[in-house]
Structures are given as structure tokens and as C-alpha cells.
Image: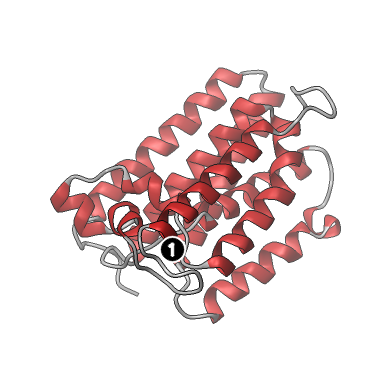
Amino acid sequence: MSSVRSGADPVVTYVLIALNVIAFVASLASGAGVAERGGGRVVADGALFGPAIANGHEYWRLITGGFLHAGIIHILFNMYFLYVLGPQLEEAAGRVRFAVLYFTSLLTGSFGALLLAPDSVTVGASGAVFGLMGGAVVALRSRGINPMESGLGMVILLNLGITFIIPGISIGGHLGGLAGGLIAGYLLFEVGERGRSRWLALGGCAALAALAVAGSLAVAGGQGLSL
């Protein structure tokens, strides 16, 4: 399944971590607090926020929101999981397909967050990280490995529990990212490998990302799902 030589540096993973760290430092420099939520011009201009997308046409927020974080604990938690999962998936999938999985999950996470709470300010790489977990589940199953036996299944269940228990966490963002990662993972690791049609798999991921963007724009104006 691997399209990267064994031992190859996980360049995409390191670049993603660097971008998140740079964005966090920039948010601190613009006035955000080290251990608190919100604050700072960078967060104000880049966080996922439905009204700004719908009324101000600030579509970049669908992506930039996934590179901003609410405090040091938030970014450390997400970067830890990215550092652990990223290199393994990047080696298994190859750099291009890994990047596709990450950004597809990020966009489906943005859609999930807006679907449930379009008027809330949302930041964090959690949607993309949950997507990596979903993609890893499919990758393990494609190799005949039970995700529960590998420990990954329990990690996902634990994080889902935290998602629903701790207030202030974007439930939609986490669930949207996980669902996107599962679907993209199926396309990349099942359709793309067993069906020997990588272009079809990449096209499917592009279509999924496009649907997530379209859905995000549809609900950004405050027409979210009420629970």
C-alpha cells in the first residue's frame, strides 16, 4: 500500500505542524492569550465563523480556522495526535494522498461545525485530526488489522467521549472531520488500492471536499441544524 520509501521523512506532517505553530505564534503576537480562548486580530480574521463567511464572503475561514487554536493546551493536544498519526499515514498513503485526506477532513470538519453551530467562533485542527483517525481505521482494516486491537479504536472512542462531555468543544467539527476521514479513507485505501484507480479515489475526495464547501456556504448564514 505504501507509495513512499520506508523511512522517508514525513514532510507534509512536519509542514502542517509548522503552519499550525506559526499561526499560533502569530495569534499571540496579535493579542491572543496563551492559555485562553479567543482574542487577537489573527483569530478574529481567520476563525471559522458563519456570519463572516455568509455576509463578508470570507471563504478562507473554512481552511484558516483549522490552523488556529484557543490556547497552548489546545494546540499541544492537536499537534501531539498529528505528530503520532501523521508520519504513519503519510508513509502508508504517500504525501499527496495524505495531504488530500488531511484537507478533505479539515473541510468536512468545518462543515460539521457550521452545521451545528454556524454562529459560534470555531478554531482548531481537531476536525482534520479526527479525519486522520478515521482514515487510519480504514487503512488498518484494508491490511486486515482490527482497529480495536491496535488501540486506535479505543483512542477514537475516548476522544469522542471527551467531545461530548467537556463543554466548549466543537461536536460538529469533530464528527464532521471523522466522517470525512472515514469516507476519504475508503476512497484512498480501498477504491484507490484494490480498485487500482487512484485518480477515481482522488476525484472522489475532491467531490467530497467540494460538497463540504457547498454545505458550509449553505449553512453559514445562521441556518444551522438545531439539536
**10 Å neighbourhood of mark 1: few (<14), some, or many (≥20)?**
many
In which quadrant of the rendered image does the C terminus lie? bottom left
Q: Residue at x 62, y 34 (%)?
A: 12
Whether residue 108 is situated above or below residue 40 in the rendered picture: above
Please state if 40 lies on the left or on the right of 136 as rendered. left
**Residue underneath mark 1:** 172
In which quadrant of the rendered image does the N terminus lie? top right
Instruction: Residue type at mark 1: give it.
Output: Gly
Whether residue 69 is situated above or below residue 102 in the rendered picture: below
Q: What element carries label 1?
A: helix
Quarter of image, res 86: top right
Please state if 171 lies on the left or on the right of 55 as rendered. right
Q: Nearer the viewer, residue 98 or 189?
A: 98
Please state if 54 lies on the left or on the right of 194 as rendered. left
Residue 94 screen position, x and y as percent: 69, 27
Residue 209 screen position, x and y as percent: 42, 38
Q: Nearer the viewer, residue 39 or 203?
A: 39
Whether residue 12 is situated above or below residue 38 in the rendered picture: above
Residue 138 screen position, x and y as percent: 69, 44
